[in-house]
Image: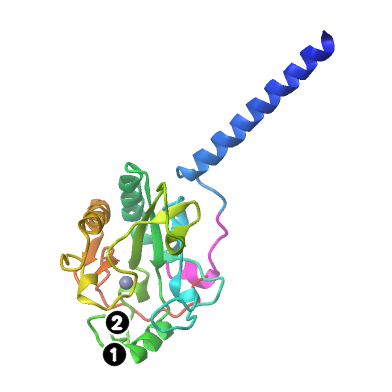
Amino acid sequence: MLARHAVRSVAILLMVGALVVGVANDTRAEGMPRAIPPVSEAARAVGLIDVRSAVPDALIDLRYATSDNFVGEALYPADARCLVHESMRAGLATAARALRRSNEVLVFWDCYRPHSVQQKMFDKVSNPAWVAAPGPYSRSHEAGRSVDVTVAARLPECPKPRRIADRCLLDMGTDFDSFTPAATAYATAGVPVAAQRARARLRNAMAAGGLAVYSGEWWHFDGPGAGARRPVIDVAPR
Ligand SMILES: [Zn+2]
């Protein structure tokens, strides 16, 4: 009798334990803070923060840290982080909160971009409509005040190329850095209706945080003062 009681107690304890672990994991997924290593001293000195300190459930997929980008080679170190200027903190947190209501999360393709990388990109695509011409100043990505983002959700089925962590990238009509008319923010030709709606959801969430889409690229959003010319920043994205 005693032994059976003990077995049942252990079973109940195990069940409670599993429940607690499950709740802890879910809570973290919903945006509870987790330990984020401090950014480098050089990055901190120019006001850059790790985006996860603003958006704890952000998924990071820095395409320029891999060869999966229009240049075809890694432009960032493999351990690059998504850094943004601290002026974007509140707006990004608001945007992420808005998307969470529809069980969607922000995915960051690019954040702060060192000046030297901007130069390398412009050398490859010398069209200012697609890649900003580098000047003797930092603005937009180079100032950590613009981000390239998309949206991921939990979908019942997900084609392999769109899988990211336990989520699925939404179909937005084009891939990142697709230099085509369909990539413009308000394009309808060649963009499925569901993708147009997904772009609109992303735009609305970002707008709630005061972040404006660049009409030439559905994934590019500017924070406050992104267009201002500031001193060149060329610290490593760490
Ligand atoms: Zn961009």
Q: Are marks 1 and 2 in contact (CB under 8 Å)?
A: yes
Mark 2: give few (<14), some (14-19) or many (20+) Cα within 10 Å. Answer: some
From the viewer's side, name the closer residue of 70 and 222. Answer: 70
Asked if 5 appears above or below 135 in the picture, the reply is above
Position above or below: 67 against 189: below
Residue 131: x and y in percent read: 29, 82
Residue that carries the numbered disc 1 in the rendered image = 126
User: Amino acid type of disc 2?
Assistant: Val
Give residue 180's position: percent from left, percent from top: 24, 77
Tag 2, which secondary structure?
loop
Question: Which residue lies under the disc numbered 2?
Answer: 131
Question: Is 223 in the magenta?
Answer: no
Quadrant location, the N terminus: top right
Q: CA distance from mark 1 to mark 2?
A: 7 Å
Q: Residue at x 42, y 85 (%)?
A: 116
Numbered disc 1: secondary structure: loop
- Total labels: the figure holds 2
